Amino acid sequence: MRENDDGQSKKKKKKRNVVFVTVGTTCFDSLVRAVDAPEIKQDLLNRGYTALLIQMGRGSYIPTKCGGEDGGLAVDYFTFSSSIAQHLKSASLVISHAGSGSIFETLRLGKPLIVVVNEGLMDNHQSELAEELAERKHLLCARPQTLHQTISTMNLESLIPYPPGDATPVAKLINKYLGFLVD
């Protein structure tokens, strides 16, 4: 391998494309188990992703760590963090539970998002939100058992950016109610 004038190798450094998985504060072992499956990791690698970082919450399933030295997908995990904002910002793809906070924070950042619905929850209103946003093409929606198919057929170019909300009309209504001048 040739070296340039400052002694550094000319070997190209592979761009780090991180898939960040978040389950929030709950236990969602079926999602963690799904992303830890060899066929999903291989699909992600085939699509150009280089690392998988899993926030596993209260779950008991421990994913398999891998440094990626063998050309495979680097895999790491953690339980909780005071903030996942930096992980979301640095991700190339986010796979998330269907919590509204995680969904809207990811969409606000303009990150491609696959929402995986936790069918183990009672009165699962989260699936309604995920399915509606998927119908509007802002994200992809899956179940743990369909995640492999969703990843293998996903077309992230077809996703439509989620428009940021405009709080002006609500603020005007509140100001009017409080008796302030409204322009």
Image (tube, rainbow, N blue to C red):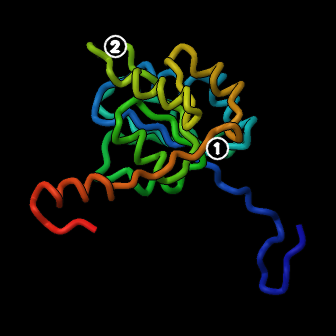
Considering the image in quadrants, where does the N terminus appear?
A: bottom right
Neighbours of disc 1 within 10 Å: few (<14), some (14-19), many (20+): few
For residue 171, side relative to residue 64 (left or right): left
Considering the image in quadrants, where does the C terminus appear?
A: bottom left
Residue 67 in view of the camera: no
Residue 20 in view of the camera: yes
Type of amino acid at the residue the image marks with label 1? Gly
Q: Which residue is disc 1 drawn over?
A: 68
Q: Which residue is disc 2 drawn over?
A: 120
Query: Could you say where residue 42 lies in the image, as x and y percent from the top left?
Result: 69, 29
Q: Residue at x 74, y 61 (%)?
A: 13
Q: Toward the viewer: 1 or 106?
A: 106
Q: Is residue 172 above or below residue 112?
A: below
- Label 2 element class: loop
Q: Which quarter of the picture shows residue 72?
A: top right
Q: CA distance from mark 1 to mark 2?
A: 32 Å
Type of amino acid at the residue the image marks with label 2? Gly
Q: Residue at x 41, y 43 (%)?
A: 104
Q: Is residue 155 above or below residue 105?
A: above
Q: Residue at x 40, y 29 (%)?
A: 98
Q: Toward the viewer: 1 or 33?
A: 33
Q: Toward the viewer: 125 or 57?
A: 125
Q: Residue furthest right?
A: 2
Q: Which quarter of the picture shows residue 2?
A: bottom right
Q: Residue furthest bottom?
A: 5
* Earlier sequence position, callout 1 versus callout 2: 1
